[in-house]
Amino acid sequence: RNNMRDIDKIIVHCSATPEGRHTTVEEIKQWHLQRGWKDIGYHYVIYLDGTIHRGRPESVVGAHCSGYNKNSIGVCYIGGVAKDGKTPKDTRTEGQKRALREILNRLKRDYPKATLHGHNEFANKACPSFNVKEEYKNL
């Protein structure tokens, strides 16, 4: 695999959209373009049904975690807030939980020295609304 970037972190995010509301890579890309970014900020997006969708190529620096983009891969699951649209909540479906574990396993295999993190470890945010370190300590 062509890995020109020196990846040392895999950072998990949520889309901060209300529980149960479907959102697409295309839609998130539009939000990010509106912020003046070149493309969707994440490398992977996990839909409610547990399917894994590509965002930016892994070889391209993402825009998902200020100060840490250069050496990280960003993975985002759709959801992360309650139906009210603002209360942080772990809204992951069974499919999303399976898919996250699968993609994180693969990324750990591809980047053995990378550590797993939630966005909240680097920013004053609830995102991804669950404790990544705790949940994936065995990966």
Image (cartoon, rainbow, N blue to C red):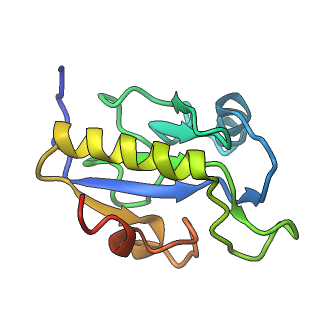
Q: Is residue 8 above or below residue 50?
A: below
Left or right: where 45 falls relative to 111: right
Give the position of the C terminus as an image quadrant.
Answer: bottom left
The quadrant holding residue 60 is top left
Residue shown at 58% from the left, 75% from the top: 126
Residue shown at 74% from the left, 34% from the top: 27
* Residue 23: image location, x then y, percent: 75, 40
Q: Residue furthest top?
A: 2
* Residue 110: image location, x then y, percent: 18, 36
Left or right: where 127 falls relative to 83: left
Residue shown at 78% from the left, 59% from the top: 19
Residue shown at 18% from the left, 40% from the top: 109
Q: Nearer the viewer, residue 130 or 8?
A: 130
Give the position of the N terminus as an image quadrant.
Answer: top left
* Residue 22: image location, x then y, percent: 78, 42
Q: Nearer the viewer, residue 9 or 136?
A: 136
Asked whether the viewer can see residue 63, the reply is no
